[in-house]
Every structure is written in structure tokens, then in C-alpha cells.
Image (spheres, grey):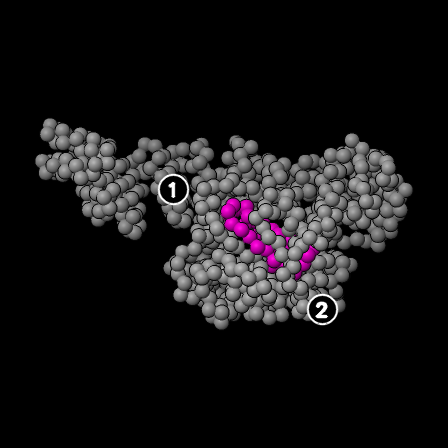
Amino acid sequence: MSSPSNPPSSVKKNYLEGIKFHKKNNLMEAEAFFAQCIAEDETFHPAWLQLGLVWSKMGRAQESSEAFQMAVSLNETDVDSLYNLGLSLLKQGLENEALPYLSKACEFSENTDIAQSIGDFFYKSGEYKTSSFFFLKAYQKDKTTPQLLKSLAVSLFQDGDTARAVHLIQGLLLRFPSNESYRALFAELMNKYAEEEFNPDTKKAIEICLTQENIRHRNLAPSWCATFLTDPDYEVLRNFPKTPDTLEADVFKALKTPFLCMGLRRSITSNAPIEFILTHVRRYLLLNWENYTSWPKSILEFISSQAIQCWYNDFIYFETSEEKQNLQALLSHLQTELSPSAKIKDDTAKLLALACCYKPLYEIYTDDSDPCFAASCKSIMAPLLKAQFKNPRYETSLIPKIKSFTEIEDATSKAVQKMYENRPYPRWTSLNSTKTSEILKNMSSNLEILVAGCGTGQEPCLYASILPEAKITAIDLSRSSIAYGMRMAEELGYLPRITFLHGDLMKVGELDKTFDYVVSSGVLHHLKEPDKGLAAILNTLKPGGKMSISLYSKIARDMILNPASDYIREKGYSSSLDDIRTFRQDIFKMPPGDPRTFCTHAGDFFNLSECNDLLFHVQEHRYTFPLIQELADRHGLSPYTVSLSPQRKRIFAEMFPNGDLSDLKLMDQFEQKNPEAFAEMYKVYFHRKNETSPHPLDMLIKIGAL
């Protein structure tokens, strides 16, 4: 703070007395002394500053702004005066007037505290563009403080600048690889993000995350795939399908790398070129299985990892007739090798893992006891044993324990039920762990949440991880899916807070219970009469509650899926395993740019149950924003907001600077210009018409955390 030149001694004395009373929070006395200072010397700007602070504490916002304004006029470079003037204007809702003063305060400040505190203010209010601006000012002076870098990264991401956000968090993760929050945040930022060129730092960061259990590994898949396809270390694998005559030593070396094996075990690789490579390697190994004793021991790590990958994609890879013949020979050989009384040795484990790339272990090894592996291969085979043997058997044991509130009677619902009983959707493996914060505990206290159509339990577990005090009811028509969800919830420690129930969504009123938040993702559009389903779940919503509904976009799905769907009808393909495999093989052989290949843009194309859901579903309705508005009007609902990624929010804001995400007419115009924006689904949040009271989850909804 600058000192004025030679104020009278009486002014100094009164100023010091005012400071004493201010520190003791005796505001009336402090005000009197500072006012006396100004009466004696109106140019003494420290008194104006202190008087402004006192008036601010007294709730006299307008007067405090005028005092700060006077202080600034007397000393235009005083950081405290500029900062407090800007802050007081902000509190009065005068953001445009405040920003120039706050910006100047940052420029004149010798440290980052001012810029960071301003950034924090806008960050907490959800104004990420402005918070990024001030965090960047702090970053210019300090490029090492972790909290600043993390706050800047989140602000940049929420403002749509994913590349810079990833760069910052990646740097933090490499500096502090054991930091759980950096790992979780990196995984979240990498969802749908991939670099075009190989980056060794990105590879290291992905490897750090892949070694951890409590990470949402599937979010890493796009970047993992991009790294695999650009990493010089894997060029030999990328070339293998071109000349697959033999597996040379350099190929074996590439196959055993931790990056490749961990990626296959942890995440579904939704990528056509990688599927092409993996199917060729798998085929080569099967067609040459009789040479297994000559394969290096290290190949077991890869084969068992690929078997897990095949389990999580539901064995969707195409099989040639030659493969099918060799598989039968291999299975026959294994029947002579496998014995419940004998430990499975390394060489036999290679063949067993290879067979598990085509069929689940529980179908190959049918004894009641667990397969017992030799010590030399036990740890390598443990993840495969868990995924393909222990987990499915445990889920089967859970099915009789699942309580029902109704049976499924509607013919359409029964057909949908049969589909999901046979192919639970989706298979998922992990979530980010989140530390319980007081804010989230308070936010979720006494909250009751309904997940109407929970599938395999990923959504209720996600809510349990974010909202530690919420009680969650999760219903579904598929017992197989619920059993999967119960097992995962138990593994993650969330089962005590989630009540899984089997029953008909349209009869959810049988629960005789109401909820603060109701979510139904990708369910209503599979009902024969979606309106009846919406009416049923809406009746469970408490007054003042919020609801989110996810529905298929007609514009996106017509463009991405219709050419492939027409081809399916033309060829007469069914939803059988062989037909889906053959259909996909046909698609892969089509020339680039053929509209029928657009369906490969969807990640669901690379998993059997998800591909079934994507292109072979027994019942599907598609919507547009005008149709959603009509649906809302029929049920007395008003849109609260629409879920958009930060990048697309930025595009929307550029198209409609004063637009609101709750305006479905604007959202329709946005989708017309960006037809792939809702390729996955619309997710629209609602409240009842004329209900405007705040909801505990509003903040999380606005930032896209729910």
C-alpha cells in the first residue's frame, strides 16, 4: 500500500486508533476515527480504504463502493483499493464495472494472491471463463503451485479448452503420481480426448492411472488408443496384420509391455484399427496353438489381458471358419489337460487364456471348484479368473436375492427384459474414487434419489460416489443387470446406500415412496408408451424436486445409424452373435466415407451388448427438442438445463451470446447446426412448471457432474 506524503500528526493518530478498533471489530468507533481523518485531510487515501472496509462489514454496499472509488482516485496503483472496489462492485452484481479494477489489481500486485483469490471467487460462482482469465494472470507469475495449476486446469476445461487443461493436470500427475485427486481429474479430462501425435508424457500419465484400481479407466480409452496407434514402440504390431506369417521376437516384446496389457485389462478399446490388430494376433495364436511350448513365458500376460478385453466386449470379434475349427481342437486338448486335482502350469495356462479369448472361462472350466494355477502364473491369471469365472458365478448367486416390487407383464417390456437378461448392458469395471467433502456431505444430506432403469448399476454407483449422504433406489427389469450392479456396488463399498429392486418402471408407484431427484437415462425411449413411463416416475418426484431424462436424438441417430440399419434390414441380419459379428465385418470392409460406416463413430459399436442396443434393439423411439418440449408440456414440466460438454457449451455461447441452455428452441437450432452434438443421447433436466425454488443439486447439475 502506498503511503501519502506527510499527513498531519493528528490524522496519523486517528488513523491508528481507527485501525485498533477495526481489528477488534468495533465498527462504529472505527468509522468515527476514519471519518475524522478524512475531515482533516480528504487526500489521505488509506482512511478512505479503511472506511470502505468498515462500511462493507456494516452492509452498506453502495457507500463502501464510493469510499473505495475515492481511495482509487487518490492512488490509482494501490492494489488493496483496486481489489476492494472491484469486489464491492461484484457484490452489487456490477460485474462489467468490477472487472477493470480487479484486472488492474492483479497487474500491480507483486504476488499471485490477488489474482488467485479473484479467480476463486468466479470459480465458485461457476463463471469459468472469467476465473480462467484471473488464474492465468496468477499463472504468469507462478507456474509451480499445485492448487493454482489445478484450479486453472478445471476452469479451462469448463470453459471448453480441454487441451490446455489436460497439459496442466498431466504435468501435475507426473510430478505427483501418488496424488489421488490428480489421477481422478486426469481420467475425467481425458474422456473423449486424444492427441493426434505421440506424446511420451501422456503415455506415462496413462500408465500411472492404469496401475490404480479406483480410476474410471474407460475414460482413458480414446487417449490410450491414440497413443497405441502413434507410439513408435508399437509400429511392429501395427505392421503385423500386413505380414502375419510369424510372430518374431520383436512382436513378442511389444505384446508383453505394461501399457498394452494394462490397457486391455482395464478398458474397452473402441477403435477399429486396434480391433484389426488384436483380431489378427489372436487368430495367429489360435491357428498356431500347437506351437505353444515355443512361445515365451511373457506371452501369457498379453493373452490373459486380451481374454479380459474380449470378455468386456462380449466376444464381439469376428471368427473365421478356420478359427472355429482350431478352437474346437484347442478345447478338446484342454479337456485332457485340465483337472480339478492338478495345478495348471504355465504352458497350459497359455492355452487356457487363449481359449478364453473366444469363450468365457466358466464355460470351459465347469468344475464347481476354482481353477488352481501354479505359483509361477497365478498372479498373471488372477484378473482373468476374477473377470470370467468368479464374478459371473457370484452374480448368478445374487439373482435369487434380488427383491421385486412387481413382475414384468407388458409384452414390449418382456422383449426388452429378455434382451438385457441375455446381454447385461453395459459391462463396466471402475469409478473414480472421491474424497468425502463437507460440502458434498451437506449437499446430499437426507436426499432420496431414484434411478429409474439402472442397468448394470453404473449410474447409482456414480451418485453414491459423488453424494456420500444420499440414499439411492435403483430399479430395473433385468435381474442379470441388477446382479452385476450389486456386485460392483459391493466392491466399491456403496451397497449399503443403494437399494436395488427388480420391477416394472411403469409401476414404480408400487414403491409408495417419493424422491428429491429422479433420473432415467436411456430407458423411456425403449418403452412401448414413453409418456406412461414418464408419468409414472414423475409421480414419485417430491415438490421442488429435479428430474433428468436421457432420450435418443432423431437427428443424430438418423444420420449416424440409419444407413447401417437399412443395410441390416437389406441383408436380413438378426441380433444373433454370428449375425452381429458378420454385420460388423461387412461394415469394416466398406470404403471410408460410406455412410454405412458412420455407425463406427459410436463407441457402442465395439461391444456386443452395446452394439445390440445401438442397432438391433427390439423397441426404440427417437426425439427432437421440439418433441421433448411437447413431452414436457404434456406433463407440466419446464426444462431447467440441457447437458452439454464444455466444448459444446462454448460453441452454443458463440452462437447465442445471451442464450440459455434451458431454451429448447435455441437448443434445436444448435443441433441443426451441430447434428452430432447429441450422438449419445439428449440429457435434459426438468422441474415442475412454476417451481423455482433452489435444489441441493443445482450446482452439480450446472457443471455437468450429474
* 587 in relation to 78, above or below: below
Left or right of 177? Residue 16 is left
Q: Quadrant of residue 617?
A: bottom right
Give the labeled residue for mark 1: 120
Does the segment drawn in magenta span residue 470?
yes
10 Å crowding of disc 2: few (<14), some (14-19), many (20+): few
Visible in this render: residue 432?
yes
The residue at the point 51 percent across, 64 percent down is: 538
The residue at the point 43 percent across, 55 percent down is: 695
* 295 in relation to 445, above or below: above
Q: Position of residue 501 (x, y in %)?
A: 62, 56
**Mark 2 vs mark 1: which is more N-terminal?**
1
Which of the pair 451/473 is nearer the observer?
473
The residue at the point 76 percent across, 34 percent down is: 378
Q: Quadrant of residue 619?
A: bottom right
Residue type at tag 1: Asp
Pointers 2 and 1 in contact (C-beta within 8 Å): no
Which of the pair 434/540 is nearer the observer?
540
Visible in this render: residue 609?
no
Name of the residue lying farthest toward the front: 512
Q: Tag 2, which secondary structure? A: helix
The residue at the point 39 percent across, 61 percent down is: 692
Residue 176 is marked as: none
Give the labeled residue for mark 2: 569
